[in-house]
Every structure is written in structure tokens, then in C-alpha cells.
Image: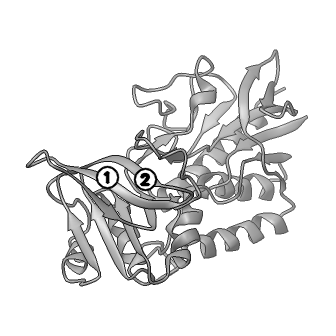
């Protein structure tokens, strides 16, 4: 029996673990992999204390800190359901492993949205990626496409231009939405070509990605561009599917929490990008993780 089980090991989950472990609270972290979204982040320039640091570098530092505190971490664990019992919770994973805890702290984060076009599933890992940090070096001197028009797509495009000979930025909208400094950099980069008001229709190839079929929304004409890699950056959705029927979720499927990070079920707390907290930033997720951990600690102190 654990005092608390943390579901997720991104900035929120790992920060929560630091606070709980320092209070000698028996804690288990369940996660598919350590790092969450930030493990794919090419560069952070707005995290206090680090003028510039990549997501993987930051995660490595926090992971080491958590391990030094004696964290128990179980990876390759996808939670299937949380079952409230009389005085504890039972957590069941997809591999049928079960764990019990007096409290639960959900820091499950978000997962990438899909295009839902032909070829997307076929070429996952065969030219299609959601991780620029992981896969950009594989496309040295090749032609790639980034699909999306927001800040994550802009950042991915600028990172890819360090490796690829040509980067297409495919935007469904007319204008890019993000930091103006980065948008200006894209406009002034000869390696980058922005294709605006273009809808992705299909991803083509034999064994690997070879072409991307697009529809020009202005002319309704279709065309194909030759690419060897496609990076999908169209947004994320909260990883809360396993919570349906257990706790209250918003219309966006985010976990509804109060000012103490508590859900509507006593003993279940949540933090980070899977919650209704309005801004989704690493530093905010980390702060929310700390706040949730303190709330868990206070809750446990009142249990008899």
C-alpha cells in the first residue's frame, strides 16, 4: 500500500514526486515513459535558471534528482482504470498489474492529435514523427514537411532546418500563429517554404513516406509534394480517456480541479496539462505538480 501513486512523469509528475519524497511520503510513479511532452522539446528559453536548455536535458536533471530521493518508478505502465475502494484506490494497468494507494495524483499530460488521413497509421515511425528532437537528425539533407500552423509547428520547422535541405510548413490557415520573432525567422529562411491554406489529404509511399497529397483551399486543386519525412504538429489532447466515469472532466476532456488541485473524488488530485489550468507550459505544470503534492501531503496528514 502506497501513500500516493503519481500517474505520469512529465514536469508535473516529477516535481510532485520531489515534494512528496522529501516529506518521506511513500510514493510510486506509474508512467509509459519518463519525460512526457517535454522530452520532445528541442529548446526551452523561458524556464527560470536556464537561459537555454533542451527538453531532454531538463528531464534528465529532474529524473536524477528524483532518483537520488529514492523514487520508485515503473515505466511501460499504461493505466486502464482507477477503482475507488473503502479507504484506498486500486489502479489497474493494461498489462493487468495492480497497485493500491491511499491517494492518487494524476499528471498524465497530453497526447498528439492525429490528422486522420490515409497513410497516417501505415507510416508511423516510417517517415512520420511527432518528435523533432528524436528524429530530426534522421533527415539530414532530405526534404521534410511540418504540418501545423501554431507555435509548436513553428519551433519544429526552425529546428528541422538545421538538418534538412528543404522544409515545407503546411498550414491549414492563412497565417501562422506564434511568436513574431520566430515567424520572421521562418519568412527569412531560404530552406523553408510555407504553404498556407492547404489541407492534408493523404500520405503516400511504398515502405517509407515518399509524398504528401494536399488540397489548395483557395483553388480547390490537389497537388503532391515529394518528402521523405513528415512531422505532425497540429495540437494535443489530454490523456484522460482512462478516467471517464471516475472523476469529472470538462467538455475538452480535461480534469476539473479546484484551487487545491483536488478533483470531485476525495483522495484524487491532478496537476499539469491534463487539467483545466488554462496555460499549458512546462513551468506551470511543474508549479502545479508542487502545489498538488502539498495538497496530497495535507490530505494524508488528516487521515486517521
Residue drawn at the location 51% of the way across and 32% of the way down: 255
For residue 35, what is the image quadrant?
bottom right
Q: Nearer the viewer, residue 141 or 58?
A: 141
**Does label 2 or label 1 sit earlier along the sequence?**
2
Q: Which mark is residue 204?
A: 2
Q: How is the image coloured?
A: one colour
Q: How many residues crowd around disc 1 within 10 Å: few (fewer than 14), some, or many (20 or more)?
A: some
Name the quarter where the N terminus is drawn: top right
296 is higher (above) or lower (below) than 245: below
- Tell me the quarter of the image containing the C terminus: top right
Disc 2, SS: strand
Tell me residue 34's x, y (percent). 70, 58
Q: Is residue 30 left or right of residue 146?
A: right
The answer to whether 133 is drawn above or below residue 78 in the figure is below
Image spot of residue 21 (x, y percent) = 80, 55
Circles 2 and 1 in contact, beta carbons < 8 Å:
yes
Q: Residue at x 52, y 41 (%)?
A: 274
In-image side of 196 versus 212 (left or right): left
Taking the image as shown, residue 240 lies to the left or right of residue 68, namely left
* Residue, far front: 206
Q: Nearer the viewer, residue 116 or 94?
A: 116
Q: Is residue 48 visible?
A: yes
> In the current view of this chain or complex, which residue is farthest to the left?
219
Q: Residues within 10 Å of mark 2 (few under 14, many from 20)?
A: many
Occupied quadrant, residue 301: top right
Instruction: Please name the residue that numbered disc 1 is placed on.
Output: 213
Please state which of residues 36 and 248 is positioned toward the viewer in this rendering. Answer: 36
Res 279 seen here: no
Which element carries disc 1, helix, strand or loop? strand
Amino acid at each position: 500500500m502506497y501513500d500516493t501513486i503519481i500517474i505520469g512523469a512529465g514536469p508535473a509528475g516529477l516535481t510532485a514526486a520531489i515534494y512528496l519524497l522529501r516529506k518521506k511520503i511513500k510514493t510510486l510513479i506509474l508512467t509509459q515513459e519518463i519525460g512526457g511532452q517535454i522530452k520532445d522539446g528541442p529548446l526551452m528559453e523561458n524556464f527560470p535558471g536556464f537561459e537555454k536548455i533542451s527538453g531532454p536535458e531538463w528531464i534528465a536533471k529532474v529524473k536524477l534528482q528524483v532518483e537520488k530521493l529514492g523514487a520508485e518508478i515503473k515505466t511501460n505502465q499504461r493505466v486502464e482504470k482507477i477503482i475507488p475502494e473503502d479507504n484506498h484506490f486500486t489502479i489497474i494497468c493494461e498489462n493487468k498489474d495492480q497497485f493500491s494507494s491511499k491517494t492518487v495524483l494524476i499528471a498524465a499530460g497530453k497526447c498528439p492529435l492525429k490528422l486522420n488521413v490515409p497513410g497516417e497509421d501505415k507510416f508511423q515511425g516510417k517517415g512520420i514523427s511527432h518528435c523533432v528532437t528524436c528524429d530530426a537528425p534522421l533527415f539530414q539533407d532530405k526534404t521534410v514537411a511540418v504540418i501545423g500552423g501554431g507555435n509548436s509547428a513553428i519551433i519544429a520547422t526552425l529546428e528541422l532546418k538545421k538538418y534538412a535541405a528543404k522544409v515545407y510548413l503546411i498550414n491549414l490557415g492563412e497565417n501562422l500563429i506564434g511568436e513574431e520573432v520566430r515567424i520572421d525567422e521562418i519568412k527569412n529562411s531560404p530552406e523553408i517554404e510555407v504553404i498556407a491554406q492547404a489541407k492534408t489529404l493523404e500520405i503516400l509511399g511504398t515502405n517509407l513516406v515518399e509524398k504528401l497529397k494536399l488540397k489548395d483551399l483557395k483553388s480547390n486543386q490537389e497537388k503532391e509534394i515529394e518528402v521523405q519525412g513528415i512531422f505532425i504538429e497540429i495540437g494535443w489532447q489530454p490523456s484522460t480517456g482512462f478516467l471517464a466515469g471516475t472523476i469529472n472532466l470538462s467538455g475538452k476532456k480535461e480534469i476539473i480541479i479546484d484551487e487545491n488541485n483536488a478533483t470531485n473524488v476525495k483522495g484524487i488530485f491532478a496537476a499539469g496539462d491534463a487539467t483545466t489550468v488554462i496555460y499549458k507550459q512546462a513551468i506551470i505544470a511543474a508549479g502545479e505538480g508542487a502545489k498538488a503534492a502539498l495538497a496530497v501531503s495535507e490530505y494524508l496528514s488528516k487521515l486517521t
